[in-house]
Image: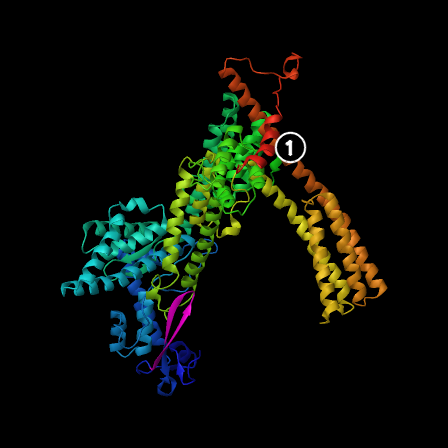
Amino acid sequence: MTAPPEYKTRRQLRSAGLCPGGQDIAAYMVGKRRGRELIAHLFDIRKAKPKRTPSPLQLAAIRKATTEHQTRAAERHGIPRHQLHQSTDPGPAWTAGPTFQEHTTMNQHTELHPDARVLQAHGLIDDEQAATLTEAQELLGAPAGHGQRITYLHAVAATSQARHARTELHGLRDAADRGREEAVAALQKLREQAEPVLSRHAAAFFDQRERKALALATGLLWREDDPRAAALAGEIVENYHGDWGVIIDPDTLTVSIDPQFDPAAMQQFEEAAAVWAREDAAFDIVTDAPMTPAAKDAARDALIRWTHSWGEPDSSRTYIATQEQRREQLRQDLAEAQLNDTDRARVEFIVDYLRADISRTDLLDTPVLVDPGEEVRGRIPKLLEHFAAKRIAPGEIAEEISVMTDADQEAVRAVGRAIAAGEAVDYRVWPEYVDRDEVAEELNLYAMDVEEQREQADYIAEHDISGETPEQLGVGDELGPRLERMATRREQLHAVATGPNGLTTLERAQLAAVLTDLDAGRIRNDKELPELLWTDERNKADVDQRRSMAPAGELSQSAEAAMRDVLNRTGVLERRDREAGVLDHALSSMSDTLFSVAAGASLGVDNARREFADKRGRLGEALANAGVDRDTKLEVRALVDDRARDAGKLGRTAAGRAQRWTARTDAVIAVRNDGNAQRAAVAAGRAPRQSRNCASRGDRPAQRSTPAPARAAGRRQLHSDLGR
């Protein structure tokens, strides 16, 4: 939708050297951007007047008035006048952005700033300049940096919601005074909705940004009726100002930025604190690790040297910038420490895992920290739900739970039999265990919302949105529901990170650190989440497989691109006939086959060979049917064979690693089952069974027996027993 050519916005008039000239708004244009309603004020260009150009004296007067106003504001905050003329370095990449404070679009009826009125009365500025000066004085400072921008966005949303709800509240009270029962009921409902918030102390919201913003809106709404609301709003307002320099006027519901606040220093401090929290968690977990006292002391000494260099805000920048150097020094210190290979590998993995950087770690060399059977417990409800809905076969569940103990498998089989019999059952066989996959999915969704929120905060900080109804932010747009959604999801994730739920202490520390990183802006979206979120064997094997897929994807894409380059010289792919379409499909299919081979041929080597031969034959037929000349066909065939050899090399490596993961899991289960059998024998008063290796030689270390039948029974019996 476009406006008639004679209607222009104030900005369009200004760019044409015109101004409204005192005319009323001729029309409105309503639209939407980012889910928010936008209203543009349009003026009739035929009634516009030439824009007056201020003289140098007038500009000097405006600058003088602006400077004096800002100086007085600074003095009210305790800043001496003489310090305002001292130059300071705000730090790299921290430059002043465009100014914006929540306000309505100005028109001739807007009350002018006192300084603007004085200048206008003396004829030094016209109406347009008076309006501009008023906006400039109202919009002191712009939010800068992640933390301040997010806080600013939340403050604007909270005040908008409070203003909107206050209007609704007054309307309901008027209707209730007139005896309307539905208004009385609506008032009671609003009060009941606010009670859970007002009954909590403000400090309960300080670690949860989105919930704090929603609590602020509630406090601002009820502050005149409930002293608890006034206290809640007051503390959150003070927190916003003290932490990020965001000023909220509870009476006028306006938001501004404290020009004396240094957001760069605070942002660096927040990011350094997030880094230190990860490193401190690594220290605590190593302290509790199963190592000898001497090894633990040696590891702790190295970790203390690793983290000791930070603690004050003025060292934050250095602390962040030296992460890699400090990690390398820690690696050297651990190499020199009195640690055996197992303990050193454990410490190295804990450190890199909590640093969210395992890029140099071979996951097959990492310690086993989670029993595979314990990990499956969290996924049992979803598996049983799919089984009940007939979305998966009994054999698929059998394969999943084959890593569990016999007792756990029997518990799952019992529920499966009840489902098959049509009984109502609780799928949560182990309700205290969370599903790692579900938690990871929730974290991904939360990170996506974090990205959208950051983009919106950046947008309102970097653009003039005075014509986009900023007073409606958080009301009738996506921002309000997103705040509620993020607050709820954040509380759920925080509960997982702090409660016993089947996750290891190390995994809970990782989840808590990720939430802190999202708050601090160190993680900006779901794509920047840690490569390895959980430490169980299944997730580590999945990450390892994705690593194998990366070069496989590069090879298949480069192969297809090379083949298309050859064929593009003939022009055959530019045709729109059937033969060209079949050829295009054959090229894509060959690329997919090369990827499958290079990724390890998950369906087996023989199957991969048959598929490759079939796709290569189909490509040859497509080339012939498309009329490609003999030399070009030979060139394409050579490319395919060359890339196939490279794919085979990658595939053998990937397949070998997949086999090692299977063997590793089997070994873990065998050791666990052997230990369980020996403990059961001791409890029954019988001597534990020992293998010949354990007793035959006194000069060799004892080895645990590995009774294979327990593993075999798990995979085979459940296939036939589940659901019977």
Decide: is 498 above or below 156: above
Position in image of residue 227 (x %, y %)? 19, 50
Position in image of residue 24 (x %, y %)? 30, 81
Q: Quadrant of residue 9?
A: bottom left
Stretch of the chain drawn in magenta:
26-40
Name the one closer to the observer, 235 or 431: 431
Name the one closer to the observer, 121 or 381: 381
Q: Is residue 42 visible?
A: yes
Seen in the image, is 338 located left or right of residue 449? Answer: right
The three-letter amino acid code for the residue at tag 1 is Ala
Decide: is 211 above or below 66: above
Name the one closer to the observer, 316 or 47: 47
**Which quarter of the image is occupied by the N terminus?**
bottom left
Per the image, the residue denoted by label 1 is 663
Query: At x 39% / y 41%, what residue is drawn?
Result: 495
Position in image of residue 539 (x %, y %)? 56, 40
| SS label for mark 1 | helix
Position in image of residue 724 (x %, y %)? 53, 36
Q: Main secondary structure of the magenta part?
A: strand
Seen as rendered, the residue at the extreme bottom is 46
Decide: is 715 above or below 66: above
Q: How is the image coloured?
A: rainbow
Q: Within 10 angstroms of label 1, few (less than 14), some, or many (20 or more) residues?
A: few
Seen in the image, is 175 located left or right of residue 314? Answer: left
Asked whether residue 38 is drawn in magenta, I would say: yes
Seen as rendered, the residue at the extreme front is 421
Seen in the image, is 686 located left or right of residue 45? Answer: right
Q: Is residue 308 visible?
A: no
Query: At x 34% / y 59%, what residue is drawn?
Result: 157
Seen as rendered, the residue at the extreme left is 178
Q: Quadrant of residue 162?
A: bottom left
Asked whether residue 458 is drawn in magenta, I would say: no
